[in-house]
Image (cartoon, rainbow, N blue to C red):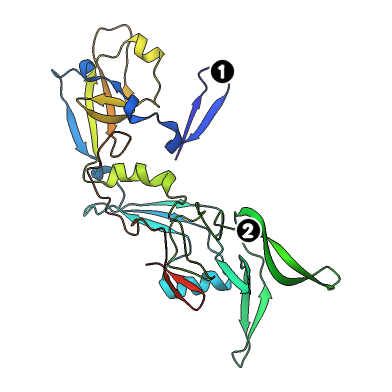
Amino acid sequence: NFMIKPSVSDATVLEIEPLADFYNSSQDALNWTSLVDFSKEVKVTPTINYASKEYNFNFKQDGDFWNGKYTNEFFDNYGEFQILSQSQYATDVTKFDLPFSQKPLVENHPSLTIPASYQINLDDNANGQVVPKKGTAFIVHLGEMRSATWRYHDEFNNPHFLTTYPYVGHLDDIDHPTFDLNFGVPQVVYYPATVYTNNNLLQYHNRFIQELVSRYGKLLTCYAKIDTAIINTLEFRNLININGVVYRLQKIADYDSTKEKTTQIELLRLIGGEGIPSEDTFETEGTTPLTVITQVNNNSIIRG
């Protein structure tokens, strides 16, 4: 997901950018059509040949009550996502494992919605007791102060009654969310809500995985007239246009400035971009656009 390269202005500085921000607009793609050597082999390979069977985006698992409840109900882990390549021959599984866990937002008291990290122990009579749990680290948005009547006990066990609390959670705004620190839209949330967002961490990965697993995904291998001027000003962030098709430049192989010959290059076809018509409906589980969830039941919102 990252592109790391020396700065053009200072080679001692490494620039680190998400791929989604790294590439220039497809409307500004460089036209290399006239550079292609069509007297040599032009090879087009479906990218699905290189794709894994599955791409799994995972959080570190935690044993708290609400994560366990979600897993038991939906046979999935809260906040995770899986993309299936639809390849009949692939066997590999690519995993993106974060060292952080994820915590469902839960309404524990009226108007008090927080990431719940605790465990419930059952006695011999199946009576539950809430006990603290030291869980795995997790990342949250820090939001505005919200109204709620609640109390906390200090280190001397003295109760303090308050009417506001600071919002923290995987959503940037619990009432009107626009970004989610999950990879996928949960099947259910455990607080009263009418809206949810599908703008989440997957957006930083999905586009580039789709260029592998899409039936329109192609790897172009050909020869081009690459000279010193091109090499000296080469920026991989620039997209390449060949015969009206836009590509990402993947590789320049065995360039030799002392010889007058064309050089082999590899390019990955761009599936979607500015000015490029969408030719494919991505065949991935759970990627249906979702903004509003309307089915409400017992303070739970079920994805519809």
> Label 1 to label 2, Cα distance in Å?
39 Å
State the mark number for residue 52. Answer: none
Q: Toward which corner of the image does residue 107 lie, by quadrant?
A: bottom right
Amino acid type of the residue tagged 1 in the rendering: Asp
Relative to residue 97, is residue 251 drawn left or right? left
Q: Residues within 10 Å of mark 2 (few under 14, many from 20)?
A: many
Q: Residue at left 32%, top 59%?
A: 285
Amino acid type of the residue tagged 2 in the rendering: Val
Determine the residue located farthest toward the left in the rendered image. Answer: 39
Q: Secondary structure at mark 1?
A: loop
* Mark 1 or mark 2, earlier in chain: 1
Relative to residue 154, is residue 304 drawn left or right? left
Q: Residue at left 37%, top 25%?
A: 238
C-beta proximity under 8 Å, tags 1 and 2:
no
Q: Nearer the viewer, residue 139 or 159?
A: 159
Viewport quadrant of the C terminus:
bottom left
Q: Secondary structure at mark 2?
A: strand
- Place of residue 95 in the rendered image (x, y in percent of width and height, measured from the top left): 42, 52
Q: Residues within 10 Å of mark 1 (few under 14, many from 20)?
A: few
Residue beneath disc 2: 168
Residue beneath disc 1: 10
Q: Residue at left 29%, top 14%?
A: 226
- Place of residue 132 in the rendered image (x, y in percent of width and height, measured from the top left): 68, 72
Relative to residue 218, is residue 201 drawn left or right? right
Q: Residue at left 36%, top 43%?
A: 207
Viewport quadrant of the N terminus:
top left
- Place of residue 215 in the rendered image (x, y in percent of width and height, measured from the top left): 21, 46
Q: Toward which corner of the image does residue 246 lie, by quadrant?
A: top left
Q: Is residue 294 above or below residue 13?
A: below
Q: Which-is-in-front pick, marks 1 and 2?
A: 2
Q: Is residue 281 above or below residue 208?
A: below
